[in-house]
């Protein structure tokens, strides 16, 4: 929101931008109301990154140091926990992180450290979950049903597939007319446009809002040129 307010601050004060200046007032009000909450979230995120650094997560692909062991990681994690003492009454984000961190470490801490003692053992199962997540989405598309219980018994057989030749695979693909494919591809692009915009706004609000303001200014210049008026 602060990035959006920064971009809106540069909007010129003209009759055509009255609603943008009204939007700027509302954004400034929201930023002022949530400044303390944002600081709390920023500090909680900083501690979350320190936890990930203590666990050496995510792995960078390089082999772990020979001296690194589960006992060393456990000792570092417990020492880090001792230094985390947020104000549980006035910092709700850090309070939630503190509670979840303590509960998870007490319940599952020793089970999370085997990857430091067993060579080749990944620290998570995200790749496996992503694989079967894709299988579940594919199953829903081809069957039209929400339930994917069949994957428990037959999911592993959908991982690999084969054809007699590349010509056979190409013939199956060519059964769909190019015009039909392009039409459905365009529909998919249009359906995904709002989500892509929200994703860009979430990841880089400064550049996204600045692009919208630039498009708005260019459109105003086009309308002014078409009506014979001087550009704004």
Image: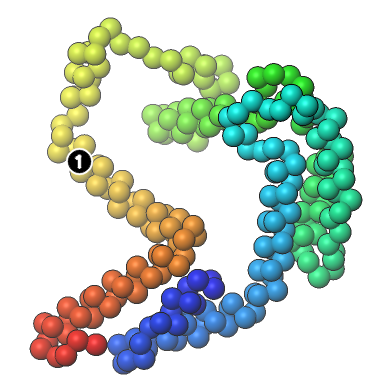
Q: Position of residue 143 (x, y in %)?
A: 41, 29
Q: Is residue 136 visible?
A: no
Which residue shows up at 29% across the image and 75% down it? 216
Residue 96 occupies quadrant: bottom right
Q: Position of residue 179 (x, y in %)?
A: 14, 38
Which residue shows up at 20% across the image and 80% down it? 221
Left or right: residue 86 versus residue 33 is: right
Q: How is the image coloured?
A: rainbow
Residue 182 occupies quadrant: top left
Q: Nearer the viewer, residue 67 or 190?
A: 67
Q: Is residue 55 above or below residue 99?
A: above
Q: Is residue 62 above or below residue 170?
A: below
Q: Position of residue 172 (x, y in %)?
A: 22, 20
Q: Is residue 179 visible?
A: yes
Residue beneath label 1, please?
A: 182
Q: Nearer the viewer, residue 213 or 49?
A: 49
Left or right: residue 29 versus residue 10 is: right
Left or right: residue 216 versus residue 196 is: left
Q: Position of residue 142 (x, y in %)?
A: 38, 29
Q: Is residue 83 above or below residue 174?
A: below
Which residue shows up at 70% across the image and 43% down it? 52
Q: Is residue 190 above or below residue 1?
A: above
What is the residue that sits farthest to the top in this orientation? 164
Label 1 secondary element: helix
Which residue shows up at 35% across the image and 55% down it? 193
């Amino acid at each position: 929101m602060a990035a959006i307010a920064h971009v809106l601050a540069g909007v010129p004060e003209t009759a055509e931008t009255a609603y943008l200046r009204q939007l700027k007032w509302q954004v400034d009000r929201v930023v002022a109301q949530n400044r303390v909450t944002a600081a709390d979230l920023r500090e909680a995120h900083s501690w979350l990154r320190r936890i990930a650094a203590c666990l050496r997560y995510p792995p960078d692909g390089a082999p772990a140091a020979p001296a690194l062991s589960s006992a060393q990681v456990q000792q570092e994690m417990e020492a880090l926990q001792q230094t985390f003492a947020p104000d549980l009454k006035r910092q709700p984000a850090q309070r939630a992180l503190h509670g979840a961190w303590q509960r998870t470490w007490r319940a599952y801490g020793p089970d999370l450290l085997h990857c430091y003692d067993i060579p080749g053992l990944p620290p998570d199962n995200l790749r496996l979950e992503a694989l079967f997540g894709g299988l579940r989405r594919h199953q829903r598309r081809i069957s039209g049903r929400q339930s994917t219980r069949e994957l428990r018994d037959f999911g592993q057989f959908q991982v690999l597939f084969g054809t007699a030749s590349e010509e056979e695979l190409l013939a199956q693909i060519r059964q769909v007319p190019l015009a039909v494919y392009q039409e459905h591809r365009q529909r998919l692009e249009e359906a995904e446009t709002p989500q892509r915009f929200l994703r860009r706004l979430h990841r880089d609000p400064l550049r996204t809002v600045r692009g919208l303001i630039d498009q708005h200014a260019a459109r105003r210049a086009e309308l002014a040129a078409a009506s014979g008026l001087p550009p704004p």
